[in-house]
Image: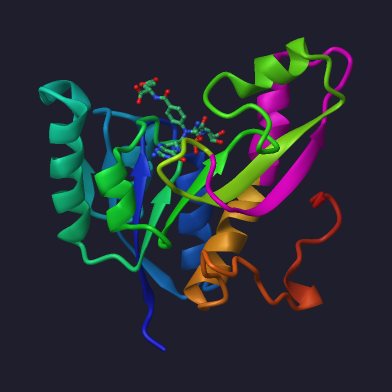
Amino acid sequence: MNRTRIVVLISGSGSNLQAIIDAVQAGDIQADICAVISNRPNVLGLERAEKAGITTVTLDHKEFESRDAYDAALMNKIESFTPDLVVLAGFMRILTPSLVQKFKGKMLNIHPSLLPKYQGLNTHQRAIDAGDSVHGVSVHFVTEELDGGPVIVQAKVDILPNDTADTLAQRVHQQEHIIYPLVVKWFSEQRLTMEAHYAVLDNKELPSEGAQYN
Ligand SMILES: Nc1nc2c(c(=O)[nH]1)N[C@@H](CN(C=O)c1ccc(C(=O)N[C@@H](CCC(=O)O)C(=O)O)cc1)CN2
Ligand SMILES: NCC(=O)N[C@@H]1O[C@H](COP(=O)([O-])[O-])[C@@H](O)[C@H]1O
């Protein structure tokens, strides 16, 4: 089977990118990250990609007249790498319908909440302010509806009495770094489609104790 070609979009730290890089380099995912594209210059995620020998591109949205113009350029840049999968890993731009349609069924996003709760931004603080006892993270297919695409897998994280957004985010990140590589692995093994977004799991694939799945 040909190796899955992946393009990753980032905007910042790139810890989820790093988790996927590590899984590819360990041979857990039979795929190649062909490029990492950032909408912000000089972010740590670009350094992570360069250290791994991955082609990096900065496409700064501030240099474009409109969201449509930016997304047209972004679409062309993504397509130039002929990806089988586009992974949004902390990519902080809302994508236009034309770009989403182009990659529908092969574009994933990780969102730091138990969707459909808390679509959008600032999710950790919103969960704390709401008095929730459980928070978490979702990996989903990207559709035109912001954070509204079919959810593939979620991981739960308890909210502790003295949690701040930062302390909660740290525990959410830990779960992100488990489930995102797992979903990319499932996709690379052609066990995920948006129509029937399921994965046939062998028990050995699930991480050891510590990961929570609802
Ligand atoms: N059409 C879609 N675009 C995106 C999706 C999606 O599901 N459908 N997921 C988001 C990721 N995301 C949350 O998971 C998200 C990213 C960015 C924003 C947002 O409000 N962005 C602002 C700029 C914010 C900034 O620069 O800090 C904007 O684009 O104007 C909300 C949710 C990725 N895109
Ligand atoms: N709405 C999108 C969003 O908030 N995504 C979140 O941004 C962080 C990126 O971290 P990373 O750059 O270290 O992977 C992650 O926590 C991800 O869930």
Colour logic: rainbow
Question: Which range of residues does the magenta coloring cover?
Answer: 148-175
Quadrant position of the N terminus in the picture: bottom left
Q: Is residue 27 above or below residue 166?
A: below
Farthest residue toward the bottom?
1
* Quadrant hosting residue 96: top left
In magenta stretch: residue 27 = no
Residue 77, compared with residue 183, is above or below; it is: above
Q: Residue at x 54, y 67 (%)?
A: 195
In which quadrant of the rendered view does residue 81 lie? bottom left
Q: Is residue 186 visible?
A: yes
Tell me what residue is drawn at x 67 percent, y 15 percent: 125
User: With 202 as the anchor, is 40 left or right in this view?
Assistant: left
Question: Toward the viewer: 129 or 32?
Answer: 129
Q: Is residue 60 left or right of residue 191?
A: left
Residue 16 position within the rendered picture, expressed as x and y whole percent measured from the top left: 51, 45
Image position, residue 79 (x, y; %): 19, 59
Q: Position of residue 182 (x, y in %)?
A: 61, 62
44 or 158: which is nearer to us? 158
Residue 77 falls left or right of residue 191: left
Point 54% across, 43% down: residue? 110
Task: Give above or below for 104 relative to 69.
Answer: below
Assess whether residue 161 is covered by the magenta stretch: yes
